[in-house]
Structure formats: C-alpha cells, structure tokens
Image (cartoon, helix red, strand yellow):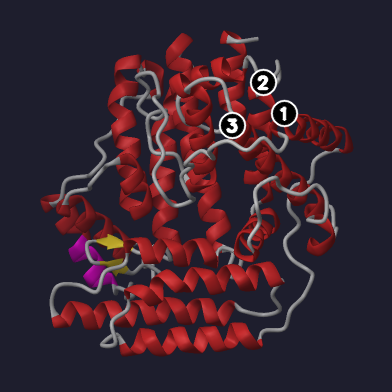
Amino acid sequence: MERTGPKRATALLLMLACCARSPLPAAAPASVATPRDLAQDEARVLLALSRGDGRFARRAGVRPTEAELHTQALAAILAEDTSARMEGDRPDLFSFDLRERAIGEAADLAAQYTHLPGANALEAARLTGLVAEERSRLAHERALPWGAPTLLRGLAETWSEGASPAEAEAADARLAARLGQVDGSLAALTPELRDALESSLDPIEAKLSWSMRRSQGALVKLRVRLAEATLSADGPVGAALTPEAENKLQTLCEELGKVAGDSGGEAPALPLAGSACRLSGGGSVVGALIAPPERTVLCGLIKALATGAPNAALVAAFHDRLVVALWATRMASGMPAGEAIGRPRPLTAMSPGLEAAWTREAALDSEAAQATAKAIAWLFANGVSEAPARARAWDALGDGPVDLAINALKIALP
C-alpha cells in the first residue's frame, strides 16, 4: 500500500483507536486459559486466517465483516506495507506481509492452549497445527517463482473484475501487476515448474474479458516468457524418504497392486485438487473444516474406504497415490523425472495429461505426496480387511496434519 507520512499515520492511528473495533478481541491470559476460552478463540483464529487469505475463508466458511477488513487495511497502511493490495474487500494472495501478520495473530491465540488436558489437548494441537500449515503455505508461496502456480490458481479462485467500470479498471491494474511480479521472478525453470505455471494461467485466462487489456497483455507476455524460458534440472530439493522407509513403501505398493490386480470394478469418484472434501470431524471445529488442497485426494480416499470393503478400483487408487510418493522421493534424491516415473507405474490408465499432472505433483510437492503415502500405510497396516474400520476412525477424527492424526488414531486403534 502507499507509504504514509508521520502526520497521516498519526491521524489513521487516532481513527483506529477511536472508531474501529479490533476484529479479534483480546483473549484471556495464558495462565487462565480454559476449554471454554478455547472454543471462543477457535473462532477468532479462523477469523484471523480468513482475513488474510480468501481461500481459507472459503474453507472455513467465515466471512469477515467490512469493518474488520477495513481495520486490517488501515493497519497495513500504518505498517507501511507497500506490498499489500486489496482485491475488492480483502487482500490479494500476494500481500505476503499482511498474511504473515494475520497468521501471527492466529498463532498468538492458539499458543495459549498447549497446556490443556485430554480431548481439549487434541483440539488445541489441531488448532496449532492448522496455523503452522498456513504459515508453511505462506513461506512456500512467497518463494517466487516456485510458489507462483498455487498463487495463480488462488487468484483465479478469488479474483473478480468488480461491479463498476472504475472497479474493473482497478482490478485490471492489480492483476496485471501481479502477473508482472511472477514474470519478473522467472529465471531458469525446471520443466515441471514451467508446465505448472502454464496450466495455472488457464483458469485466469478463462475469467478475463477482453476489456481487461492490461491483464491480457501481461498474461500474453508471461506465456511468451514461459515458452522461451531456459530449462534446467535444478530446483528446490524436496524431502526424500530414508532407504528403509522407501523400501516399506515399495513393498506396500506391490501388495496393493496384487490385491487390485486387473479385475476392474467401478472407479471411486474422488474429488480433484481444488474441490471441496470434508471429513466428519466428530464435533471438532478444526477437524470438520474443508480439507486443504494437499489433502483433498486423501480426504476422498478415506471417505470412499470408510463406506465398506474396497473393490479393486479403490485399492488401485490407493496404490497409485503410493506410486506418486515413490516418484516424489526419487526426484527429491536427485533422480531425473523421466527416470523416476519409469517404475513403478500406476494401475490407472494414464493419458499424457494425467501423467504430466502427477509428475508435476511429485516434483513440486514431495512433502504432500509423502504425507499421503504415510496415511495410506497406516490405513492398510493391518491388511485390506481392516482398512475400512481405520478409515471410519479417521473420518470421525476429522482433518488435520497427517502425523497429528496418526498419533491420535494410534491411541484408539493401536
């Protein structure tokens, strides 16, 4: 946002103090925080995260008020945050410093409840884990150009031209500036990152009318840059599994492959990344949230498995997620993508588009692929026959970081 001089800042500070209410009322001190406070502050945490990220607001079903968003915008001015841009009534996803302040606000609230016992301890841990995941998401996305594909998909999800010609002109200028920001971050790209950037521009292009001339021009320029980009095999090093863990994953993959065989069966209707999937959650506020994109497919697999004995097609779907995780750990170890995807192969019939999408997933999000594999390993730890019961327990527990969920489930189902 525009820089603000001392007099302007003082006036705005007085305005905030006299006229604006804080969107997140102060919570009880940590020494007296109680389960009742936790229930109240969960709503405040969801609100803080929703004010900073429109995608999270949709996941949580939270709509900040106009006054709360206005207060946040004024706070950005006082902080001399030159990176913040408002997209209609909320900040856009490239407003990294503003998002960081919102996450910090949520983290301060969540940190008060780490001492609570029993079921409240689990809910407090889920709340802390939720904030940590959003902080990790921000760290990934602000590291351009690697975070650009998710940012661009998020822009397509939350961006609007506006209702009036003036709003449309301002929205056009903002979007063109953000596309230019991505353009300016480009250097040598891996083939997977280039393809991910290309595909993430498609939903933006589909929403643009021809009156958005600045954005249209910036988008064409970015596509040309991607087409002419120097390709490199070098990129961020993902998380590789230990050889022992990789061997266990390979063994489970082979076992599920034998169960699935070639007997066919109706494939499960799994949600695609970016669509909505929600586990039951057993009364947990955090556990009943819509799963984040990195757990959307896992959520769909759990819900499909929880309905009863899995058929061959469903087992094949689990097998194929293990395949993606094995590709991911091999790429993270330095193996070229073309070699990494050679074996094992998915049981699903692979079109060129699907293979490219799964290769990008393995190359660019190895941690999520491996977390999904860890969840599958726990679900099938006692064999295929007991997997549906474990899936029902996970569905009742609800969404959350995979390690946290497994630790909680081990208590109920050793």
| Coordinates of residue 175 in the picture (x, y in percent) | 36, 77
Q: Name the residue furthest front.
A: 263
Q: Residues within 10 Å of mark 1 (few under 14, many from 20)?
A: some
Q: Earlier in the sequence, mark 3 or mark 2?
A: 2
Name the magenta segment's main secondary structure: helix
| Coordinates of residue 162 in the picture (x, y in percent) | 20, 72
All told, the count of numbered labels is: 3
Residue where numbered disc 3 is placed: 402
**Residue 30 visible in the snapshot:** yes
Query: Which span of residues is magenta-colored?
Result: 6-12
- Give the foreground label among 3 and 2: 2
Task: Note whether 115 is above or below 177 in the view shown.
Answer: above
| Coordinates of residue 327 in the picture (x, y in percent) | 76, 50
Tell me the residue at 63%/30% (across/down). 375
Tell me the residue at 69%/49% (across/down). 366
- Give the foreground label among 1 and 3: 1
Residue 28 numbered mark, or none = none
- Does 10 appear in magenta? yes
Quarter of the view holding residue 340: bottom right
Residue where numbered disc 1 is placed: 259
**Residue 336 visible in the snapshot:** no
Q: Amino acid at mark 1?
A: Val
* Secondary element at image label 3: helix
Residue where numbered disc 2 is placed: 384
* Secondary element at image label 2: loop
